[in-house]
Amino acid sequence: MENGGLEKGLDQWEVHASPSASAEAIKEAASIGESGLRLKIFSMPASCEVTSPKVQVTAGKAYLAGFWSGGGGGSQPASASIEMVFFDEHGAALPAGLAPAGKKARTAVAGGTGWSPGELAAIAPESARTVAVRIKPMAGQPGSTVDFDDFRIEEIPDPTLAPASALPVDSPRIRELKQEIQRDPTRGKEPPKIVLKLDDLKPSAGGAVSPQWLRVADFAKEKNIKISIGIIAQAFEAECPPIVQWIQEQNAAKRVEFWNHGWDHAAGEKLVREFSGQPYEYQKDHFTRSCAIARSKFGFPFESFGAPFNATDAATVRVLSEDPDLKVWIFGDPKDPAGKTVLRGSPVTIETRARPDFEAFLEAYAHNRGADYFVMQGHPGGWKDDGFEQFRMIVDFLATQKASFVFPMDLAGDAAAPASPSK
């Protein structure tokens, strides 16, 4: 897409505004580069329509529109709709295109303190010649905003083609992102703190530590970095001396913080999870039994907690507030933190679609650099060799950025209020 990054201002973009809302390309709205799109509401109902530069299409083909949104929304962000619009040979808008299975051609987004990726997809109708994205305000207080940047539209590859056997080590996009980051590595802030949140540790056959977990721990030792590992406590009810000894050794060497990842990591019907949709008594029992395993088997209390599936509710708040050992709630509720330090989530993470992906990490890091810390989630027990290599690339890149790798407990008392990337 021409000028998808708005580096040429609103050149080739169409804006139809009114006194109730405005759209402008400004530096303060940029996630990467020097300019981004800011939609601002002055009164409701707000009327404004912004259409991106058009991209040629072939009827019957599927197209993906990617973008980043959030930015400087502040405490009262605006929300907006964004959709894919196809046009005929005369430039007239066509009825909404059909979205491919599992995709959507329209969505709603809101401003915020960080930047999140968005994705739309639609199939070009028979008479379609071009496609664009169109943005309209939905809701907000006077003065509230939502920012957009880094738009792209591309044809979706034929799903019948065989995928690559491994993720790319290098690509034009990786080189472009590295150049962007090098231009302004931390946006005037200190290098970030990194929490490597590694989930789902349990014993392997014979009570051993699986090779996948061992190589991650050995790599962390080699690099002299801290990692954190979430334990599924029920798996340690049976006798498993090898892995228990390994946990004790890693804890004593202060190389790993082991944290409470629930009792059984069970999932019920209708999105009921171990710590979401279950009554207080059920959650209290699971949490208490997990804590007891830590003290009796490992010889130390859990001081951090992260729920299975990162799913919690009001009953969880009550349970956590009653535990004096617990200091940090990973991906908790900042509006109701149970008296704990809440570590917020971020698009900057290890895995994309359940596997480590260096390019996806780098994309998110470029948009959100300048934040004070990132909690990056992964599941090493399921990583194959190529996934581990992608993880290694992520860690090595962060080391070049002078990032410091810390435990969740290292952020206790410092991270309750979210911080936004500087522009």
Image (spheres, helix red, strand yellow):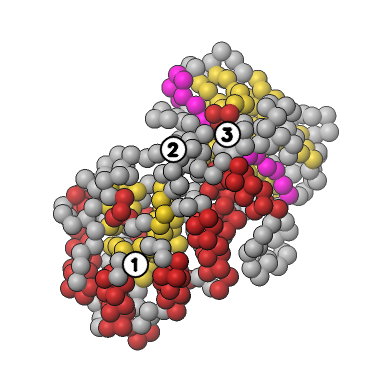
Vertically, is 370 above or below 309?
A: above
Residue 73 x/y as whole percent: 46, 31
Q: Which residue is mark 2?
A: 420
Q: Nearer the viewer, residue 283 or 411?
A: 411
Whether residue 154 is in magenta: the answer is yes
Image quadrant where residue 170 sits = bottom right
* Residue stretch rendered in magenta on the structure: 140-155
Question: Left or right: 159 with respect to 416?
Answer: right
Left or right of 54? Residue 146 is left
Q: Under tag 3, what secondary structure?
A: loop
| Residue at the image position 52 percent from the left and 69 percent from the top | 388
Task: Name the residue furthest bottom.
Answer: 206
Q: Is residue 358 visible?
A: yes
> Mark 1 highlights which residue?
255
> How far, Cα to Cα, is label 2 from label 1?
29 Å
| Other-residue count near label 1 (Cα within 10 Å), few / some / many at <14 / 14–19 / ≥20 | some
> Is residue 176 on the magenta stretch?
no
Q: Residues within 10 Å of mark 2 (few under 14, many from 20)?
A: some
